[in-house]
Image: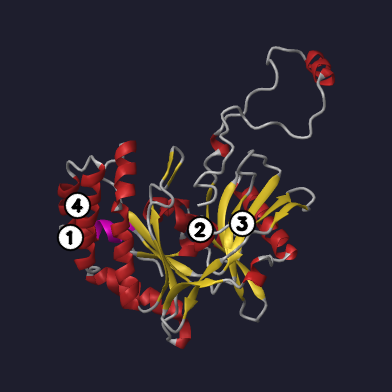
Amino acid sequence: MSTSHVLWLDDCDADCAPRVGGKALGLGFLLRKGLKVPPGFVVTTDAYVEGTEATGLKAEIAAILDGADTMETQQEASERIKVLFDAAELAGPVAAEVGAAYRRLCGVTALDVPVAVRSSATAEDRADASFAGQQETYLWIRGAADVDRHILRCWASLFTPQAIAYRAHLGVPLEGLAMAVVVQRMVASESAGVMITLDPVTGDRSQITIESSYGLGLAVVGGEVTPDRWAVDKVTWDIRTRVIGPKTFAYRFDPVVGAVVTQDIPPDDQAIPSMSDEEVIRLARLGREVEKAKAGPLDVEWAIGPGADGPRELFLLQMRPETVWSQKKVASISDPNEDILSRMLKAMSQPMRLRDAPPDDADGAPTGDAFR
C-alpha cells in the first residue's frame, strides 16, 4: 500500500526522506537489509501539512507561537496548541487510509493488535542538531480510533515547551515544519535497551556498547534505572567488560489495567543479567553489520521478546546516526610535508600505546543522543 498519506516501512528509502522522517527511514533501511524489525507503516508529512492547513490549525499555531520567546510564554503556547490537537480529528481521507493500514497490520485475526505510535520528525536527524527525544512515543495502543488519537498527539508533540525552545534557539522556522508518525507492531519485550557502535566515553570505534534492562526499553532510554552494560570487541567478539546493574523495576504491559505500568523487580532477580552472553554477541554482530552498511557509528534501540516459534528473538526498533564522536575531526598525526623515512623514524622513537587518549575537548560523559 503506497499513497500520499501512508507508506509501509519497507518502502521508506532516501527518495521519500522528507515525507517520512528519520525514524521511518532508519526502519526502512533495516527491513530492506532483511533484519528482524516489527512491521508497520508511516503516516507521512503530507497528512500533517494537509490536515493542519485544511482545518486552520497551521494559522492558529503560528498566531500562538508569535512572541513566545520566554520559558513562561513557551509553556503557555505549548498548552494551548495541545488543546487544539486534542479537539481535532484526522481528515476523512487520512483516517480511511490509516484505518486500512492498521487493519492490514492486524492481519487475518481481525484483532486489535497493540502498536507503538512514534513521532518521526523530519528535522530530528540533521547533522548540526538532533531533535531526537524532543517528541513523543506512545506504547501499546490498540484499535483504529486510539491510533488516530495518538497520531494527533504525536503531531502536537512538535510543540512541547522543550521543542519550541530548542527550535527557537536554533532558528528553525515554523514554515516547512512537519511531522511523520510511525505505527509499528509492539514487541512484548522481556529485555530491551540501547546499543551504540563505539565507546560513548572515549569514542573508541573498536568497541560496541550495549545497555539493557528488563521489560520495555523506557527505563533505559529515560535513564531511570542503572542498566546492565556490556562492551564488546568488534574484532574478536570478546566481551571486554560486563557490569550487571541493580535493575529495581521494569516497565511492562499489564493486561488487567490495559496499560503500561511499572513493576518492581524482586531483589534476587536484580543481579541476574537481562541478556545472555550469546544474545549480547548476536546483538553486537548485528550492530557491526548495520554500521558497515551505513558507513558510520550508530545508535540503535532494540528489544528481545518471544518469537513466533517460542524462543526469544531479537528485534531492532530504531536506528539513527551517532552524532557526537562521529562529528569530531580527526587530527593529522604527521606533517604532510614530511617524507616517508622521517615519519618512520619518528614513529619508531615513540612509546607504544594500547589505545589513544580521548580528544582534548571530550567531556568524558555519554550524551543524550548516545543513551537517551
**Three-letter residue code for mark 4:** Ile
Quickly name the residue at label 1. 54
Q: Quadrant of residue 337?
A: top right
* Vertical arrangement, residue 362 with respect to residue 95, above or below: above
Residue at disc 2, secondary structure:
loop
**Three-letter residue code for mark 1:** Ala
Quickly name the residue at label 4. 61
Contact? badges 1 and 3 (CB < 8 Å): no
Q: Earlier in the sequence, mark 4 or mark 2?
A: 4
Q: How crowded is the residue under tag 2: few (<14 C-alpha within 10 Å), some, or many (20+)? A: few
**Three-letter residue code for mark 2:** Glu
Q: Earlier in the sequence, mark 4 or mark 1?
A: 1
Q: How crowded is the residue under tag 1: few (<14 C-alpha within 10 Å), some, or many (20+)? A: few
- The reply to whether the magenta stretch includes residue 286 is no
- Magenta region: which residues? 45-50
Q: Is residue 88 visible?
A: no
Contact? badges 1 and 2 (CB < 8 Å): no
Contact? badges 4 and 2 (CB < 8 Å): no
Residue lying at 58% horizontally and 29% vertically, measured from the top left: 329
Quickly name the residue at label 2. 224
Q: Earlier in the sequence, mark 2 or mark 3?
A: 3
Measured Cα–Cα span from mark 1 to mark 3: 44 Å
Q: Position of residue 84 (x, y in %)?
A: 19, 61
- The reply to whether the magenta stretch includes residue 47 is yes
In front of the other: 280 or 201:
201
Residue lying at 48% horizontally and 56% vertically, measured from the top left: 222
Residue lying at 54% horizontally and 71% vertically, measured from the top left: 264
